[in-house]
Image: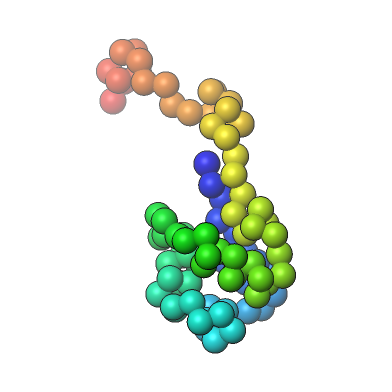
Amino acid sequence: MLENNFSTILGSRLLRVTDVYKATGISRSTLTNLYYRRTKTIRISTLTKICDYLDIPLSSLIEYYPESHFKKEDTIQWTSSNRNQS
């Protein structure tokens, strides 16, 4: 699972998407989609520009948690018994 911290970082620094756009040249639509977590794919070069501007490591911007990090109890296990409960 990937955790996108872009909006949290901007909020904590009182920065706007427009500030990042003006400083980096990355399109507003790309930044807005990243901000609202609508982005499915993004280039590494885009992420590195953002990280350079914010002076943070990539791991602060995008965190990765392996699936094994989550407990099996935290996910719904569909069995024949709970399919018939609705």
Q: Residue furthest top?
A: 81
Residue at the location (30% across, 20% down)? 83
Q: Specify the quadrant that holds the C terminus.
A: top left
Q: Position of residue 13 (x, y in %)?
A: 69, 74
Quadrant in which residue 79 is drawn: top left
Residue at the location (36% across, 20% down)? 78
Residue at the location (64% across, 67% down)? 51
Q: Position of residue 76 (x, y in %)?
A: 44, 26
Q: Is residue 16 visible?
A: no
Q: Nearer the viewer, residue 85 or 41?
A: 41
Q: Position of residue 10 (x, y in %)?
A: 62, 71
Instruction: Tally the marks.
Output: 0
Q: Residue furthest front?
A: 45
Residue at the location (27% across, 18% down)? 84
Q: Is residue 42 above or below residue 2?
A: below
Q: Position of residue 82 (x, y in %)?
A: 35, 18
Which colouring convention does the figure follow? rainbow
Q: Nearer the viewer, residue 62 or 70?
A: 62
